[in-house]
Image (tube, rainbow, N blue to C red):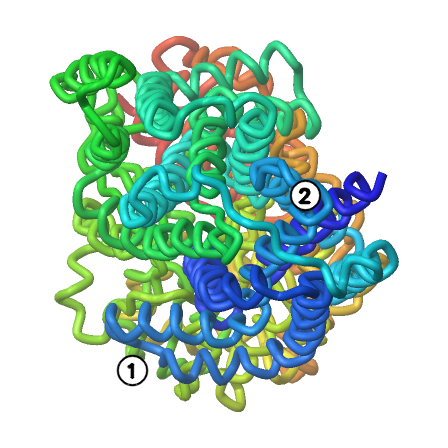
Amino acid sequence: MRLIYLYFVFFLSGLAGLGYEILWTRMFSVSLGHEISSMLAVVCAFFGGICLGGWVFDRPVSRSRVPGLWYMAFEIIIGGWALLLTTLVPVINPLVASLIGAEPTFFHHWLTVFLCVFILLLPATAAMGGTLAAMDRLFTRLKDEFSVAGLYGINTMGAMAGTVLVSFRLIPSLGITAASYILIFCNILCAAGVWSTQQKQLVDQPISAGTAKDAIFSSTRIFITLIVTGFLGVTFEVVMVRALSQMLENTVFTFTLLLSVYLAGTAIGSMLYQCFGRRFEFTQGLTVLVVATSSFCLLSIIVLPHAEDIFISLHRSLGEGFRQAILSETLLGIIIFLLPTILMGATFSHLAQHLKKPSGGVGKALSLNTLGGTVAPPLAGIYLLPAFGLKPVLLALAGCYLLLIPRLRTRSAGAALVPVIMLGMLFFDQNPYRFITTDRDDVLVSYQEGITATVSVIQDSDKNVHLKVNNQFQMGGTSSVYSDLRQAQLPLLLHERPESALFLGLGTGVTFSGAADYPGLQAEAVELIPEVIKATKHFQKASGDLDQSKNLRIVSGDARHYVTATEKKYDVVIADLFHPARDGAGALYSLEHFRSIRNVLTEDGLFCQWLPLYQMNLATLKVIIRTFMEVFPEGQAYLAHYSITNPIIGLVGSTSALRYPEKWFREKMRDPAIRKKVLPLKYDSFYSLFGTFLAGNASLKEYSGGASINSDDHPVVIYQAPRFLYSEQEPPYTRLISLVNELGPASPEDILADYITEEDYLAKERLQAYWKARNSFLLAGTKIEKTRDVQKLYESAREPLLAVIRQSLDFSAAYYPLLSIAYEIYPYNRDASYQLLNDLIRVNPMKREAALLQQKIFAE
């Protein structure tokens, strides 16, 4: 019974340990720039600290007559340091960001990232490295024939439980600080548990003598094998997670699920070794394990190209919904990870058991294995994968396991022919392992493996070029130029005279190109993924050559980190469309990030955050609006355009209230350079610009009043948005119409300056009429038949759009579609064409286009 209780204590210790890894990854991502940087740095720091602690504490713990006291001390140190970090990290993060700098070199950035996190986590992680040796010594004294495998397995199973618990329950429900307190309490329970059950064993217990098996194999060879297997195991995890992230949704839950399966497989392997493995002679057992590990890694590599099809089949069979999607990702993770990781767990247990001696060994085994794991994240994630590509790295990994066979002249070594044959087949296979979904007529223009993502450029059958990141997120293309340029021009127009602008996110570069040659403006764009910057050359047809624009500059870096570290001030800051469900994007909608942006604004500065309503539900939108309004209480909302398929909302905030007289737009248009930019985007009047106005601060505050605030401590968006992504989604226009209805009629007083002239006085009624027509136009778009049959299109669109035009003579978005229909239907139904043009002339005599078209086609 005492052993079972101690097993539970060590399970709880593992739960807390991996729980801290998840929490600290989120906490440090603020200063390190991105979740990828933070994840690599925290994993490396974890392994490095455990390595150091395991090596330093192995001998004194193993020789101690009071290993229980050592274990209690380790748990108290872990919990105490975690408590200190919970308080200090929010204060330290700005300092770390300043050490990295706004525009660091590659070497300086990564060196600072890894060193800072390693030093800050070292007391806790070093203590974690000593817990296995201390608990092993406790168990050994209670049971002479005890194997370290079972203990390692139960601790790893606890780590798996901690990963799931923290990611799925504690952070979403309670936030990071409260979750930390719960894990700290777990450390206290672990220390108290050992104290309550082991008081009689804490003193005067003799150290048992070793056995003959202690020296059956060269310790140096075991040391090397432990280091290499640690490196290969973590490399397998890092590379496979990167590969699967291109096929799955790559949310915060995706990483959690894959890591959980990896840990579960390692735990199962250790427990199986506890039950069956000790009967094997060392050399024979190690040979079987490394050959089997290589074989199953190769089997996973063979399955990998079919992973996306497997996931789609699983998802379809299980149905739509969050739980079904999570289960589908878990099952795919099991298919890819489970068998190799079972063998990895058994291999470590085999090596650790045979390194174990009365004077120590378990701590050294853990230390050496984690030493290999420490090297893996920076070497595999930052260098090997971008340099050599996915498939070569995976094949090299599987091949390296075969190099660990202790003796080739044994019967067991003959089994190595199986993975050798598999390795040869895969090596000569021409499949380059590029996971990108394309239609039959699409052309893959460019494909680049990077540190944070895989970036591809695709040309479709209509010769439009599109940018994709990790195959799941399309970041614009030449078919969305109109929308992309409006996202630049609206905030630039709203500022009286912008001299400096910062674009957060580059994408295809089209939006950024809207600032090119803008009168008196110097603009910078910050892009996280270097491969995206390189891909902009494929979009020069739409954006022009950004490198040749004297007033544009591109910075490679993370948007969140840049605005925290820079000392510059900007008149306008424009944030790109960040998919809220994508892992890491939620931090770009946080309270602290919005505050950092406000700090880099000039006295009359303006910030515009664009939101992809087609990629989020209204609940997530409300959270973002509520958070935004906390920092910019005078905030406003605009529509980027009148699309019902891809609606985009812009939140505009400033250090002061934004109000405009009616003549303001005409004065702007006196500059021919500005006029050249905005007129093609149908910003041709005061009303066409402010007709996109959706709501003022009072309406936005009322609309979002009951929503949570998205903060670094309580990251609501990153955990809430994936639930929408995984669920069966209604068409985007339903959310747009619902948003417009819930916000209610906009108030002209929210944007109009005090009435100065007669035009200003009349602008109130004209704006209200425009907004009414706009809302009717959006609703009509949901009812008009989507067809290429011109006659059917004419019949379904004619009356709804004419009704819209009657509501506002300034609103032209309904006028031009009918003009186009009149032209297209002319060859098939001249009477209908003539009548439609007459209707347009009658309902809006201010516009001459219908009369000119009628005169042209019917005069022939």
**Which three-letter amino acid code belongs to the residue tagged 1?**
Gly
Which residue is at 29% across, 16% downward? 412
- Pick the front one: 77 or 213: 213
Instruction: Say which quarter of the image contains residue 123.
Output: bottom right
Instruction: Judge depth for marks 2 and 1 and give the one in front.
Output: 2
Give the labeled residue for mark 1: 520
Locate residue 476, reporting x and y percent. 37, 43
Residue drawn at x 66%, y 60% as measured from the top left: 767
Whether tag 2 and tag 1 are in contact, CB under 8 A, the answer is no
Separation of disc 2 and disc 1 at Cα? Answer: 60 Å
Which element type, helix, strand or loop, lies under badge 2?
helix
State the image quarter where residue 149 is shown.
Answer: top right
Residue 719 x %, y %: 66, 47
Q: Nearer the viewer, residue 260 or 362?
A: 362
Q: Position of residue 268 (x, y in %)?
A: 58, 28
Q: Read off the residue under disc 2.
A: 158
| Sooner in the amino-acid sequence: mark 2 or mark 1 | 2
Q: Is residue 673 visible?
A: yes
Camera sees residue 497: no
Locate residue 745: give its quadrant.
bottom right
Nearer to the camera, 419 or 816: 419
Q: Quadrant of the C terminus?
A: top left
Q: Residue at x 49, y 20 (%)?
A: 335
- Label 1 sits on a secondary structure element that is loop
Count residues near mark 2 (Cα–Cα under 10 Å), then give few for <14, some for 14-19, many for 20+. Answer: many
Residue type, label 2: Gly
